[in-house]
Image (spheres, helix red, strand yellow):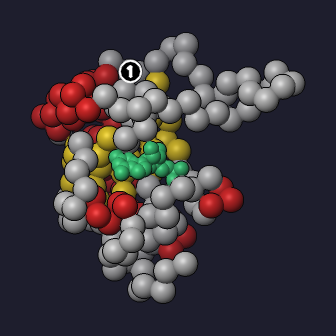
């Protein structure tokens, strides 16, 4: 549990390190408030994380301006990602807090391009009923680098 003032960088946070340029990422877009980059464990090609540049654990502690800045970039970012990946559909997923499935404790929005025939509700564990799955694959950095360039050029 961090005692830092919300919005100030957390030196132990992996996303703060990405923002500071201490850890590389396939960057798609940034402005004063927001950074968007490819997820290193994508559910599909073009799986993107959109994060505030300030360290806020969850959406409920974000200033309204920060949340608004994330919302503002969604239409153009999603259009570029869909065009570059050839997808027509996408999910916006967002987990707040560890019991809600949040692993990286710096708020982030998953923008996940989808193609027909893929389904995040895979039958898992026994009774055959669809349950939420997270079928991530390891990123291919060469392909991801080219895709990131293509998406950035569309913005
Ligand atoms: P959460 O479960 O917290 O909603 O999702 C965290 C996401 O962050 C995961 O999809 C994971 O693949 C991604 N992630 C974790 N560490 C890194 C990293 O160092 N770089 C990138 N690009 N993504 C990361
Ligand atoms: Zn952080």
Instruction: Using the rendered view, name the quadrant where residue 113 is placed.
Output: top left
Task: Describe the element under mark 1 as helix, strand or loop.
Answer: loop
Seen at 33% across and 53% down, the residue is 72
Mark 1 burial class by Cα count in 10 Å: few <14, some 14-19, many 20+: some
Seen at 20% across and 33% down, the residue is 145
Image location (x, y in percent) of residue 106: 44, 64
* Residue sticking out furthest to the left: 153
**Rendered-image quadrant of the N terminus:** bottom right
Q: As displayed, is residue 43 above or below residue 13?
A: above
User: Would you say residue 132 is visible in this rendering?
Assistant: yes
Say left or right for 72 vs 146. Answer: right
Say left or right for 28 vs 66. Answer: left
User: Would you say residue 151 is visible in this rendering?
Assistant: no
Image location (x, y in percent) of residue 96: 58, 60
| Marker count (numbered) | 1
**Rendered-image quadrant of the C terminus:** top left
Q: Is mark 1 within 8 Å of ligand 1?
A: no
Image location (x, y in percent) of residue 2: 49, 80
Image location (x, y in percent) of residue 80: 26, 32
Instruction: Using the rendered view, name the quadrant where residue 47 is placed.
Output: top left
Say left or right for 99 vs 29. Answer: right
Badge 1 is on which residue?
A: 87
Residue nearest the observer in this picture, 128 or 90:
128
Seen at 43% across and 38% down, the residue is 41
Residue nearest the observer in this picture, 7 or 15:
15
* Residue sticking out furthest to the right: 127
Seen at 19% across and 60% down, the residue is 21
């Amino acid at each position: 549990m961090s005692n830092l003032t919300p919005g100030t960088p957390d030196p132990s946070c992996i996303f703060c390190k990405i923002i500071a340029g201490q850890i590389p990422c396939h960057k798609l877009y940034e402005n004063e408030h927001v950074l968007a980059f490819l997820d290193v464990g994508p559910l599909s090609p073009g799986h993107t994380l959109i994060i505030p540049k300030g360290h806020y654990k969850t959406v409920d502690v974000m200033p309204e301006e920060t949340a608004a800045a994330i919302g503002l970039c969604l239409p153009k970012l999603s259009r570029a990602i869909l065009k570059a990946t050839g997808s027509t559909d996408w999910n916006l997923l967002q987990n707040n807090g560890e019991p809600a499935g949040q692993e990286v404790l710096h708020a982030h929005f998953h923008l996940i391009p989808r193609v027909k025939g893929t389904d995040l509700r895979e039958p898992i564990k026994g009774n055959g009923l669809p349950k939420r799955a997270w079928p991530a694959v390891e990123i291919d950095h060469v392909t991801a680098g080219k895709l990131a360039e293509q998406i950035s050029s569309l913005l």
